[in-house]
Structure formats: C-alpha cells, structure tokens
Image (cartoon, helix red, strand yellow):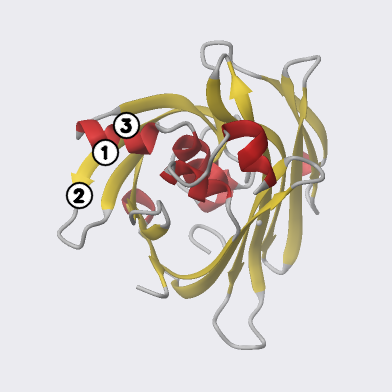
C-alpha cells in the first residue's frame, strides 16, 4: 500500500459508566471501514475489547486487499493499554503492541512493550532485511504524562475526558505523545514520518458538522489528520490528507 505494496472495570475505576460518554471508548466494539488511497480500495476490520483478567484494553486492526473471501492481509496491528488513574486523572497507559506488514510478498514484524523500571519502550523487530532485525530501546520523553498508541488514539485521548470538555466549551487542544505502533515500517508506508516511535502530537476540536458529527484534528509534525466522531465517540470518518487516505465507516 501507499509507498510500498493490527460492568467490572466501570465499578472499580469510575464508580458509574452510565453518565460518562467517554466510557463508551472502553466497551466492546467491532466495525468495518472502507479505506481508499492512491492504490485503490481496501477493507479495514477494527475490533476493541477489554480483557478483564489482564486489565488491558486491546484495539486490533487488520487491512485486507479487498472484501472477498480470498482477500489477502496487508497489515495487522494490535495495541494494548491499561485503564486507570494517574495523578487523579483518567488515563490509558500504553502496555504493548504488535504490528505486521507485507512488502513485496514478505512479512515484516514489530512488537513493543513497556519497561517500567527503565522508563523505556522496547522493540523487537523481525524481517527479511538486516536493518530491521533484533532489539531496540527508546526512552520515554519526560515532558509529558500522556502517551497514546496511534491505532488507539481515539480511545486514549477520549478516555481522558478531553472530547467531552472540548465539545462543552466549543474549543480545546490536548498535547501528548503519539507512539507509532507501526514503527519503523511506517517510514516505508507514509511520507514525513519520524525515525523514532515517539512524536509530539496535538488533538484539537474543530466543531460540529451538518450531519452532527464532532470533528477533531490530529497534528503530528508535518501531518494533519481529521477524525469525525458520533455522539458515542465512534469513528465515522477519518481523513489523512497528506497521505491521500480516506477511511469511512461502512455503516455510514
């Protein structure tokens, strides 16, 4: 693709889930999306589940070559985060990630996990190329408390309550660090990507569309993305203009 062709919690953490829309972001969800870019049209299947026994929220995403029964898997990712409180603030703390992508018929793998003692993110890479093999370690930046895996960014930022407060005030900016869970292979897929898994990001509220969707923009470096969410903060549309990517909920 692109340049080259993953009731108990509420009671424990929150006391009540019924009155807080952001709690929808840790509930079970399965959706299909239509992805379009300069190479054609593809299918995304996205799944969210909270694993109570491990206290981990897992979001998985798989991109298929088409919608047929014989479709090939092009990308697969899974990100895990732990819901809880940090400095009396609700937050999803990154835990681990898995990513695989196919380039020229060959599989490339990347997995990450948090090393709490060393305050770092450890990556294990496996691929047909020597430059993308072995272990790597990256220290967490110290100028922020909020870190979100890219493929879990809506759940991560929404869980903090930012969406609700921004909508209520009709304005708002949330600064944090994106963790590119597709690192380092995103550099092969997308333009203007960093050579580190961490990148400073801003989520901003842009208003409400005529259809009643809330529009939020995600800015990272030279890239700007737009998310359109419904009242339950479900993703209905996602545009990454610089990369020529359009993602639409198939139920829309």
Marks 1, 2: nearer the viewer: 1
Image quarter where the C terminus lies is bottom left
Q: Position of residue 210 (x, y in %)?
A: 14, 59
Helix, strand or loop at label 1? It is helix
Q: Residue, x 34% and y 37% (percent of image)?
A: 164
Q: Which residue is mark 2?
A: 208
**Where is 169 relative to 235, above or below?**
above
Give the structural element (helix, strand or loop) at label 2: strand
Residue 77 badge: none
Classify mark 3: helix, strand or loop.
helix
Q: Please, which residue is most extreme toward the top here?
A: 142
Q: Are marks 1 and 3 in contact (CB under 8 Å)?
A: yes
- Up/down of 58 relative to 94, above or below: below
Q: From what the image shows, is residue 5 above or below residue 178?
A: below
Along the line of sight, which residue is nearer the eye, 133 or 199?
199
Q: Is the residue marked by circle 3 packed among few (<14), some (14-19), or many (20+) residues within 10 Å?
A: some
Q: Which residue is mark 3?
A: 165
User: In 3D space, how far apart are the residues under numbered discs 1 and 3 (Cα atoms)?
Assistant: 6 Å
* Observer able to see residue 173: yes
Q: Count residues near mark 2 (Cα–Cα under 10 Å), then give few for <14, some for 14-19, many for 20+.
A: some
Residue at 52%, 38% in the rendered image: 156
Which quadrant holds residue 217?
top left
Q: Which numbered mark, 2 or 3, is in the foreground of this view?
A: 3
Q: Are marks 1 and 2 in contact (CB under 8 Å)?
A: yes
- Which sits in the foreground, 217 or 246? 217
Residue under numbered circle 1 = 167
């Amino acid at each position: 693709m692109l340049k080259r062709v993953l009731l108990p919690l509420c009671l424990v953490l929150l006391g009540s889930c019924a009155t807080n829309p952001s709690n929808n972001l840790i509930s079970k969800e399965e959706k299909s999306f239509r992805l379009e870019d300069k190479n054609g049209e593809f299918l995304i299947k996205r799944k969210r589940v909270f694993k109570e026994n491990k206290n981990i929220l897992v979001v998985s995403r798989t991109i298929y070559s088409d919608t047929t029964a014989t479709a090939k898997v092009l990308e697969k990712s899974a990100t895990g985060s732990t819901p809880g409180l940090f400095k009396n603030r609700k937050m999803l703390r990154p835990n681990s990630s898995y990513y695989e992508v196919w380039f020229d018929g060959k599989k490339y793998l990347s997995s990450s996990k948090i090393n709490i003692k060393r305050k770092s993110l450890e990556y294990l890479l496996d691929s047909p190329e020597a430059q993308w093999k072995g272990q790597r370690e990256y220290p967490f930046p110290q100028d922020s408390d909020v870190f979100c895996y890219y493929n879990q960014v809506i759940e991560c930022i929404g869980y903090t309550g930012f969406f609700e407060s921004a909508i209520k005030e009709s304005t708002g900016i949330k600064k944090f660090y994106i963790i590119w869970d597709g690192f380092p292979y995103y550099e092969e897929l997308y333009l203007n990507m960093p050579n580190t898994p961490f990148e400073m990001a801003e989520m901003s509220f842009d208003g409400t569309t005529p259809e009643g969707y809330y529009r939020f923009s995600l800015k990272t470096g030279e890239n700007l993305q737009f998310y359109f969410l419904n009242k339950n903060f479900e993703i209905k549309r996602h545009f990454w203009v610089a990369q020529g990517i359009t993602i639409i909920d198939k139920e829309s």
